[in-house]
Image: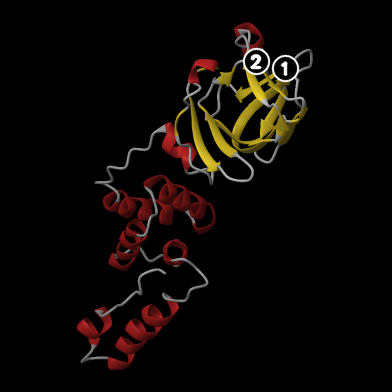
């Protein structure tokens, strides 16, 4: 449960002069509307900034709400995108005015996101740790367990250009693997067949005894859930790396 928002500025500044206004500001606006559970606080902060910008209010009240947005998780990249988007509808002068305030608020923002951090923010499963099977991959990959009971499921994340070697899932019966793509762009290829592009939402069923590989596109991070299919005497055979020229020629 999020922390309850409490505001006292109305009573502190206008309690004696305008107690009714102070009540509406502290008890209704911040006491009830800002604590309404249907929207999270970050979303309310964004809506408020957009509303003030659209109204042409670029004084200390907007700066307060920009600071509030930052304190509730709005990043520098996000606020820049929000202001840019709103500028297309509210006008160029308002965009410049709000950017001047936003630059002050985020001036000391020390957040430096790596490519890995940015990709993690795009997918719902953890990237995890460096892949212990990395010797069978070209490039850097990561592995995170999602389920280790009933049906084993792992999230496998590939840095751009990373792919695993050709390999085969052996089984006397059953076996094989299912890939559920959750972010980025990659490829899957079976021996003797053209590569298939993988994007978020793509599902690949890999039967046992089929030689194949999968991994990221050269210019994109990529992640998929690997679902291990139960089989009799199941094992995995790692083979040769994917030919560099063949990989680089993928479109």
Q: Is residue 237 above or below residue 223?
A: above
Instruction: Tell me which numbered mark, 1 or 2, is placed earlier along the sequence.
Output: 2
Q: Position of residue 26 (x, y in %)?
A: 32, 82
Residue placed under numbered mark 1 in the picture: 211
CA gap, disc 1 to disc 2?
Answer: 6 Å
Foreground pick, 133 / 140: 133
Q: Residue 102, how many percent across, how many down?
A: 33, 52
Q: Is residue 189 left or right of residue 81?
A: right
Please tell me which residue lies in front, 177 or 235. 235
Query: In the image, residue 25 lies at what x, y percent?
Result: 34, 82
As drawn, is 225 to the left or to the right of 99? right
Q: Secondary structure beneath disc 2?
A: loop
Residue ranking furthest to the front? 233
**Rendered location of residue 19, percent (x, y):** 28, 92
- Residue at x 36% of width, y 60% of height: 72
Return the mark for residue 166. Answer: 2
Res 7 label = none
- Report the quarter where the N terminus lies: bottom left
Q: In this figure, which colouring scheme has been used for the structure?
A: secondary structure
- Tell me the quarter of the picture where residue 46 sits: bottom left
Q: Quadrant of the image for the C terminus?
A: top right
Query: Residue at position x 51%, y 51% from top?
Result: 85
What crowding class fits label 1: few (fewer than 14 Cα within 10 Å), some (14-19), or many (20 or more)? many
Instruction: Check the image and report above or below for 207 versus 95.
Output: above
Task: Give 240 or 175, whichever is nearer the viewer.
Answer: 175
> Could you tell me how many numbered marks the image carries?
2
Measured along the vertical axis of the image, is residue 196 above or below residue 247? below
Toward the viewer: 175 or 41?
Answer: 175
Mark 2 nearby-residue class (10 Å; few <14, some 14–19, many ≥20) = many
Q: Secondary structure at mark 1?
A: loop
Q: Are marks 1 and 2 in contact (CB under 8 Å)?
A: yes
């Amino acid at each position: 449960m999020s922390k309850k928002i409490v505001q006292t500025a109305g009573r502190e500044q206008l309690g004696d002069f305008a107690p009714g206004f102070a009540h509406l500001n502290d008890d209704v606006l911040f006491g009830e509307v800002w604590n309404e559970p249907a929207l999270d606080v970050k979303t309310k902060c964004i809506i408020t900034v957009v509303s003030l910008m659209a109204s042409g209010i670029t004084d200390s009240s907007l700066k307060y709400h920009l600071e509030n947005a930052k304190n509730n998780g709005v990043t520098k990249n996000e606020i820049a995108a929000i202001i840019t988007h709103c500028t297309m509808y509210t006008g160029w002068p308002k965009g410049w005015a709000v950017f001047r305030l936003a630059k002050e608020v985020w001036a000391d923002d020390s957040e430096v996101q790596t490519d890995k951090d940015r990709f993690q923010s795009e997918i719902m499963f953890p990237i995890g740790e460096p892949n212990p099977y990395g010797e069978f991959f070209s490039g850097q990959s990561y592995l995170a367990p999602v389920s280790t009971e009933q049906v084993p499921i792992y999230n496998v994340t590939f840095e751009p250009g990373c792919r695993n070697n050709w390999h085969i899932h052996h089984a006397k019966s059953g076996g094989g693997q299912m890939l559920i793509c959750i972010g980025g762009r990659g490829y899957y290829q079976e021996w003797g067949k053209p590569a298939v592009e993988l994007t978020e939402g793509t599902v690949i069923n890999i039967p046992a005894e089929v030689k194949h590989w999968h991994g990221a596109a050269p210019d994109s991070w990529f992640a998929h859930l690997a679902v291990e299919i139960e089989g009799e005497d199941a094992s995995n055979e790692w083979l040769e790396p994917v030919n560099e020229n063949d990989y680089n020629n993928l479109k």
